[in-house]
Image (cartoon, rainbow, N blue to C red):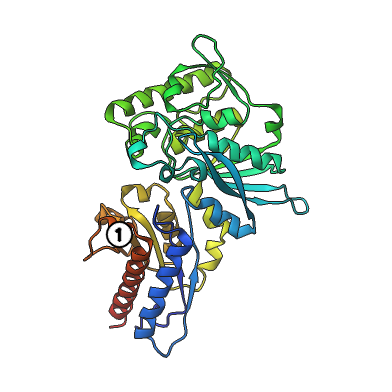
């Protein structure tokens, strides 16, 4: 019996970003080029279709993917970096159409992302989401009433206190003194009083697209899992975990909801928790939001193969990251799904989860500094897609 993949009607290329190296649309184009060249070698006389569908999961590039799906346009704003230095950052804005409210799509990483902090300066005790609050406030001033925030890729563990402060919330310390400087991770433990943000926020709907399911505190929480990735030492990580716990307790004492154990509340160093408690933000898995927005279920119809990808594929990929969510949707149609990555850990676990193959694009190459060069990454991604497609189709049609 002939393999159902032999006639190559349609291939879906749906990668996430290769963080800090290639954006999702750039990765999709590189993979598509490799697939196209591979298919020409195997099926020179057959027609086929390649659809590129960049995806995201709340992390870097989520706002851009969602904005493209609905036609929102970029807006550039003067704001502050995680280290509270003046920078320019962008978000996307969609004016109201008919009965639809004006919408804004904001990546937290645009003003609070780890790439904005030089490696020697990375320490979540010293960083703040205040700049993200400035972006949110600007969107509200422009008329946005529906705001979607991608929460991944942050350099911060401030519980969202900095962003809330930029939106007008006021904080007092243990001595009752108003805290006027932008709040950072090191300030969390001193917060003893929180007053709600201004009344106009009651008319604003905020949805946070989370890229993790982590709670606020504990062994799988915002600090213990992610603070070391942001530059914290072991001692600083333990300190931040305790500070987040105290912050959650203070929120409750001040009349706000208990969000400490809320799934996803640990996203972006607890940004999701603070925004949910004080600003009434709703937390949703970012990958599912994006797949719905790009119409993935419809676009999979008639496809015979999906190729996805991300910078690092490991156990965290299975925590509702974009490649995993896309794979599960594709596997409902029993099609093979290839995962391309710049770095791979726990390959067997990923294969057991449903990926047909997990491919290291740097295999046979130096995976050091040169692999972080965008041009080199593009070439390796294209070559990996070329080889993977040839291997898959030739095997299935042998």
Residue 229 or residue 294, whichever sits in front: 229
Q: Residue furthest bottom?
A: 45
Q: Residue at x 62, y 43 (%)?
A: 147
Which image quarter holds the N terminus?
bottom left
Q: Residue furthest right?
A: 98
State the residue position of label 1: 371
Q: Secondary structure at mark 1?
A: helix
Query: Can you give x and y, in whole percent of width and height, for residue 232 in the image?
Result: 32, 32
Q: Residue at x 57, y 39 (%)?
A: 79
Query: Can you give x and y, in whole percent of width and height, for residue 254 in the image?
Result: 56, 17
Left or right position of 66 against 389: right
Position above or below: 210 against 343: above
Residue 28 or residue 212, whichever sits in front: 28
Position above or below: 289 against 79: below
Crowding near the residue tagged with mark 1, few <14, some 14–19, many ≥20 C-alpha atoms within 10 Å: some
Residue 205 or residue 394, whichever sits in front: 205
Which image quarter holds the C terminus?
bottom left
Query: Can you give x and y, in whole percent of width and height, for residue 144 in the image?
Result: 69, 44
Q: Which quarter of the picture shows residue 73?
A: bottom right
């Amino acid at each position: 019996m002939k393999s159902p993949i032999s006639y190559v009607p349609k291939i879906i290329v749906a990668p996430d970003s290769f963080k800090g190296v290639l954006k999702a649309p750039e990765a999709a184009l590189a993979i598509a080029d490799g697939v196209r060249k591979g298919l020409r070698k195997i099926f020179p006389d057959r027609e086929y279709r390649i659809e590129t569908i960049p995806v995201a999961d709340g992390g870097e590039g989520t706002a851009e993917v969602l904005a493209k799906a609905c036609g929102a346009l970029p807006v550039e704003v003067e704001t502050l970096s995680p280290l509270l230095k003046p920078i320019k950052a962008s978000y996307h804005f969609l004016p109201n159409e008919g009965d639809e409210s004006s919408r804004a799509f904001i990546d937290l990483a645009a003003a609070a992302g780890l790439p904005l902090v030089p490696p020697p300066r990375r320490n979540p005790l010293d960083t703040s989401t205040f700049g993200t609050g400035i972006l949110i406030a600007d969107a509200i001033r422009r008329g946005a009433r529906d705001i979607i925030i991608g929460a991944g890729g942050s350099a911060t563990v401030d519980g969202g206190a900095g962003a809330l402060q930029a939106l007008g919330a006021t904080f007092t310390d243990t001595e009752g003194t108003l805290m006027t400087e932008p709040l950072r991770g090191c300030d969390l433990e001193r917060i003893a009083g929180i007053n709600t943000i201004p009344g106009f926020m009651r008319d604003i709907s905020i949805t946070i697209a989370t890229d993790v399911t982590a709670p606020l505190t504990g062994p799988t929480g915002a600090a213990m899992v992610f603070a070391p990735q942001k530059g914290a030492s072991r001692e600083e990580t333990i300190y931040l975990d305790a500070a987040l716990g105290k912050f959650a307790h203070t929120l409750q004492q001040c009349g706000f909801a208990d969000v400490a154990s809320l799934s996803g509340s640990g996203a972006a160093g607890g940004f999701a928790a603070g925004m949910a408690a004080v600003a009434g933000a709703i937390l949703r898995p970012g990958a599912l939001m994006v797949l719905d927005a790009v119409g993935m279920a419809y676009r999979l119809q008639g496809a015979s193969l999906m190729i996805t990808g991300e910078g690092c594929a490991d156990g965290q990929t299975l925590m509702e990251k974009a490649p995993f969510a896309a794979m599960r949707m594709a596997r409902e149609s029993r099609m093979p799904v290839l995962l391309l990555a710049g770095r791979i850990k726990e390959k067997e676990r990923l294969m057991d989860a449903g990926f047909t193959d997990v491919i290291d694009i740097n295999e046979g190459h130096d995976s050091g500094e040169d692999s972080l060069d965008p041009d080199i990454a593009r070439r390796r991604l294209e070559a990996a897609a070329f080889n993977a497609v040839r291997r898959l189709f030739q095997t299935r049609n042998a």
